[in-house]
Amino acid sequence: MHDVAARAGVSHQTVSRVLNGFESVRPVTRDRVLAAITELGYRRNLAARTLATNRSRAIGVLAPAVSEYGPTSTVQAIEVAARAAGYHPLVTSTTSDRESILASLGFLLDQAVEALVVIAPQQRVLVAIDELELTVPIMTLQSLRVDSATAISVDQARGARRAVQHLIVLGHRRIQHLSGPEELFEATARREAYQAAMVDAGLAALPVIVGDWTAEAGMRAATAIEPDATAVFSGNDQMALGLISGLAALGRRVPEDVSVIGFDDVPEARFYLPALTTVRQDFETIGRVAIESLIRQVEGREAIAVAPLEPELIVRASTAAPRSG
């Protein structure tokens, strides 16, 4: 910083004010400082700054080591929201075993993060959090806990019910569910909501087919679809894509023979053949609200209490009324 000050012909306090965005610096002076920063390739030492201010302005983000659309979109939304608020997102991933979860959380805490966002798709992640007895504010992104001050999620059950009810309104009575992995909160919520919606409508729930979120699992599931099933609610869009392909290979057309509805609304969903009816989750809002709530706590204010976000049904060409006869 002193080198930048000497190059720009100003005090190091002026350089500090420019770096921290103070408006009291004259534009011509600010431009001279910024030019010196560029010429010297100056970068602030965040470790030294943390020691000097006792603030890291870092928010740790723990995500599952997966490539599915939902978790990756959520992480991206969190990063954008944190940076916009002037904080540094530090992201690390973990596998589902206890040792990896604890090690990843420990790594983030070692970086002096001021708060944590944890994408918690399964129970063992929540157990690890409780085990560490964390002292920093934390927000978990999952669909199990009901404490709206420390958790935020999309209402998975509401989304699944809307998907099934859409099929029922179209006239379908034999509806099957292709589920995600059994141990994951979101897959469980969607599966249970499917079964409840069928019972509420006086319909028999067909055997649930368990997949792994991948298009390959959807492709394989095509052979397990009941011969008289006229519609399938897929636990996510990738499995729906594979299912549509698998059904086509078996000579069953979508939606003429079998309607298919997914979940998530991945960017490619409207380009599927046929374009996929699905349930949209607002990942951008999840990330923004999680960061806003954490920053309030870091600054000594109350957390934002947020009810589960409402999902949106997106109707496209992959669902239609069943053929008569």
Image (cartoon, rainbow, N blue to C red):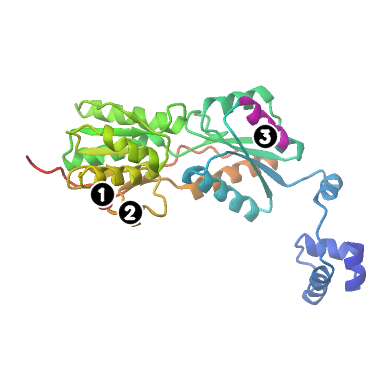
Label 3 or label 2, whichever comes before in sequence order: 3
Q: Nearer the viewer, mark 1 or mark 2?
A: 2
Tell me where the magenta segment starts and ends, as one range: 98-107
User: Would you name the residue on which mark 3 appears?
Assistant: 104
- Cβ–Cβ below 8 Å for labels 1 and 2? yes
Residue at x 48% of width, y 38% of height = 153
| Predominant secondary structure, magenta span | helix
Is the residue 203 above or below the residue 159 in the image?
A: above
Secondary element under disc 3, as helix, strand or loop, is helix
Q: Residue furthest left?
A: 325
Whole-number angstrom distance, CA of label 3 to CA of label 2: 37 Å
| Residue 106 included in the magenta stretch of the image | yes
Residue at x 30% of width, y 48% of height = 277
Viewer-proximal residue among 155 and 226? 226
Label 3 or label 1, whichever comes before in sequence order: 3
Residue at x 63% of width, y 50% of height = 82
Location of residue 155 in the rendering, given as x and y in whole percent from the top left corner = 41, 37
Q: Quadrant of residue 174?
A: top left
User: Would you name the residue on which mark 1 appears?
Assistant: 318
